[in-house]
Image: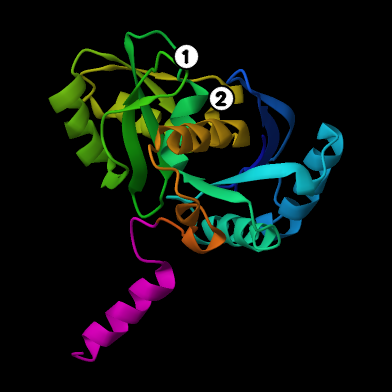
């Protein structure tokens, strides 16, 4: 089976075409990532064309679309999910599977020493981080410790004190450097925080494919109706700016 995976949940856009063999091995055939200032709506489809062309595969050969459904940038997540839905609607037997943005980031470094705890962090602005803790997995897929959450720096630091005091913590994601600086300066550090390497820091669509495939394979039922384009939906941990402004205006009017 060939998998097309997409990640547009943050500033980095990433696409991958990979092959899942009958022997149970998943390997990337072609990958593309863009860190530039182009919007994802401009870069995503050309990246998909590039990866299909360089993998030597046609879209008709793709059996699964894996997409990072969030949390993350509201616009970015919508672009990725809507593109996946639009492509999948044209192929009736396409499997559509979502992955967590934070789990996919943790997957980038899931092969680190078992002594580490992995903290995936995305800068959510407004002094908050999308975050989740994981442990390295024996199969290269991280083992979740906490659910995806939207927390302040102080709340995450307190969670580290409670759960991981004295542990080594590997930071990954576009919020990692910001968090690391705050953690080092705060004097609250009861753990040994370390930044992962640049190559592993940001979104990687192959990690999306790995997480989505494991989610599908772990499903004991695998009912086709659960993996249709209609089932693809963004995952948000807070209301969008427009929705927050709407709620505020209604509150001011006493509604």
Part of the protein shown in magenta? 236-255
Report the predominant secondary structure element of the magenta stretch.
helix
Q: Position of residue 74 (x, y in %)?
A: 49, 60
From the top left corner, tell me how far across and down residue 8 is, in percent.
Answer: 59, 49
In the image: residue 176, left or right of residue 158: right
Q: Is residue 90 magenta?
A: no
Which residue lies at the image location 35% right of the left edge and 9% below the top edge?
114
Residue on which the image places disc 1: 111
Which quadrant, please, contains the C terminus? bottom left
Query: Is label 1 in a helix, a strand or a loop?
Result: loop
Name the residue beneath numbered marker 2.
Answer: 200
Name, please, the residue furthest toward the left: 162
Contact between marks 1 and 2 (CB within 8 A): the answer is no
* Corner quadrant of residue 160: top left
> Do we see residue 142 in this rendering?
yes
Quarter of the image with the N terminus is top right
Q: Is residue 150 left or right of residue 125?
A: left
Residue 224 screen position, x and y as percent: 50, 51
């Amino acid at each position: 089976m060939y998998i097309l995976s997409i990640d547009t949940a943050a500033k980095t856009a990433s696409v991958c075409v990979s092959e899942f063999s009958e022997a149970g091995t998943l390997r990337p055939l072609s990958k593309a990532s863009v860190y530039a200032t182009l919007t994802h709506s401009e870069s995503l489809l050309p990246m998909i064309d590039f990866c299909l062309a360089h993998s030597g595969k046609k879209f008709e050969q793709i059996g699964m679309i894996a997409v990072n459904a969030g949390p993350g940038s509201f616009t970015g997540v919508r672009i990725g999910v809507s593109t996946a839905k639009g492509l999948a609607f044209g192929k009736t037997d396409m499997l559509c599977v979502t992955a967590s943005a934070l789990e996919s980031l943790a997957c980038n470094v899931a092969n680190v020493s078992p002594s580490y705890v992995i903290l995936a962090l995305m800068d959510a602005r407004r002094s908050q981080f999308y975050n989740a803790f994981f442990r390295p997995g024996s199969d290269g897929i991280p083992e979740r410790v906490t659910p995806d959450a939207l927390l302040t720096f102080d709340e995450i630091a307190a969670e580290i004190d409670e759960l991981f005091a004295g542990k080594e913590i590997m930071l990954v994601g576009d919020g990692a450097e910001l968090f690391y600086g705050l953690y080092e300066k705060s004097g609250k550090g009861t753990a040994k925080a370390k930044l992962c390497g640049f190559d592993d820091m940001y979104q990687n669509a192959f990690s999306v494919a790995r997480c989505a495939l494991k989610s599908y394979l772990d499903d004991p039922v695998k009912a086709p109706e659960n993996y249709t384009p209609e089932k693809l939906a963004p995952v948000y941990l807070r209301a969008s700016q427009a929705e927050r402004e709407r709620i505020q205006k209604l509150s001011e009017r006493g509604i």
